[in-house]
C-alpha cells in the first residue's frame, strides 16, 4: 500500500503519492556510503594535521638554525670585544 499526502489549497485538495520508504538493503547501502565518506573525511583531516605538524617542525628547525647562527655571531663579536679591550688595556698600561 502506497503512502499519500493530502494538501489543502484554495481550490480544493491535492493528493500526492509519497515515495516508498527505503528498504533494509537501501538503508545498509546508505550506511556504507556514509561510513566511507566519514573515513575519507577523517583521513583528510589527519593528513592536513600531519602536513601542519611537518610544516611547524620545519619552521622550528629553521628557527633553531637561525638562533644558532646568531649565537655564533654573538660569541664571535664578544671574542673581538675581548681582544680589543685587551689591546686598549695593554696599550694604556
Image: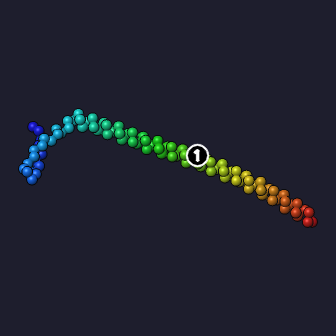
Residue 40 at x, y percent in the picture: 39, 39
Determine whether the residue tagged by mark 1 lies in a helix, strand or loop: helix
Residue 1 lies, in percent from the top left, at: 9, 37
Q: Which residue is mark 1?
A: 58
Q: Is residue 72 left or right of residue 64?
A: right
Give the position of the C terminus as an image quadrant. Answer: bottom right
Residue placed farthest to the left in the image? 12
- Residue 91 is drawn in which quadrant? bottom right
Which residue appears at 58% of the width and 45% of the height?
A: 58
Q: Nearer the viewer, residue 89 or 22?
A: 22
Q: Position of residue 16 (x, y in %)?
A: 12, 43
Quadrant of the rendered image containing residue 87: bottom right
For the point 48% across and 45% down, the residue is 49
Counting labels gives: 1
Quadrant in the picture for residue 80: bottom right
**Residue lying furthest top in this view?**
25
Q: Percent position (x, y) of residue 19?
A: 17, 39
Q: Residue furthest bottom?
A: 92
Query: Farthest residue toward the front?
Result: 11
Amino acid at each position: 500500500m502506497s503512502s499519500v499526502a493530502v494538501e489543502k489549497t484554495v481550490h480544493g485538495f491535492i493528493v500526492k503519492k509519497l515515495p516508498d520508504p527505503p528498504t533494509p538493503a537501501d538503508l545498509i547501502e546508505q550506511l556504507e556510503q556514509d561510513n566511507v565518506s566519514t573515513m575519507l573525511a577523517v583521513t583528510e583531516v589527519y593528513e592536513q594535521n600531519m602536513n601542519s605538524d611537518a610544516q611547524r617542525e620545519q619552521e622550528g628547525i629553521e628557527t633553531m638554525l637561525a638562533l644558532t647562527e646568531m649565537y655564533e655571531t654573538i660569541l664571535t663579536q664578544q671574542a673581538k670585544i675581548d681582544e680589543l679591550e685587551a689591546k686598549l688595556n695593554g696599550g694604556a698600561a
